Amino acid sequence: MIRKHFAGFAASALALAVSAQAFAGTVTTDGADLVIKTKGGLEVGTT
């Protein structure tokens, strides 16, 4: 049961990552710049 639930979660996370990658090149803004740093330590802020 736990494996089936984890597999569904992993598939959802993978789908989200793929869809986020598809939109990553088309982000524009007129406000403050948004800075996102990952590699295991997610940091989100503005400049």
Image (cartoon, grey):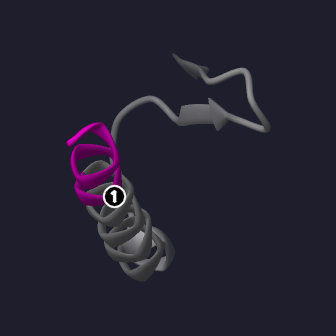
Residue 14 in the image: x percent, y percent?
41, 66
Q: In which quarter of the image is the C terminus?
A: top right
Q: Give the range drawn in magenta.
A: 1-8
Q: Residue 12 magenta-drawn?
A: no
- Closer to the camera, 32 or 14? 14
Q: In which quarter of the image is the N terminus?
A: top left
- Closer to the camera, 37 or 2? 2
Where residue 39 sits, quadrant-wise, is top right
| Residue that numbered label 1 is attached to | 7
Query: Quick check: 27 left or right of 5?
Result: right
**What residue do we see at 32% from left, 66% from top?**
11
- Closer to the camera, 36 or 17? 17
Q: Is mark 1 on a helix, strand or loop?
A: helix
Amino acid at pointer 1: Ala
Query: Quick check: 37 left or right of 23?
Result: right
Residue extending farthest to the front is 1
Please determine whether, in this image, residue 10 is positioned above or below residue 38: below
Callout 1: 10 Å neighbours few (<14), some, many (20+)?
few
Residue 44 in the image: x percent, y percent?
54, 21
**What residue do we see at 28% from left, 37% from top?**
2
Please determine whether, in this image, residue 46 is positioned above or below residue 38: above
Please determine whether, in this image, residue 46 is positioned above or below residue 26: above
Residue 36 in the image: x percent, y percent?
61, 34
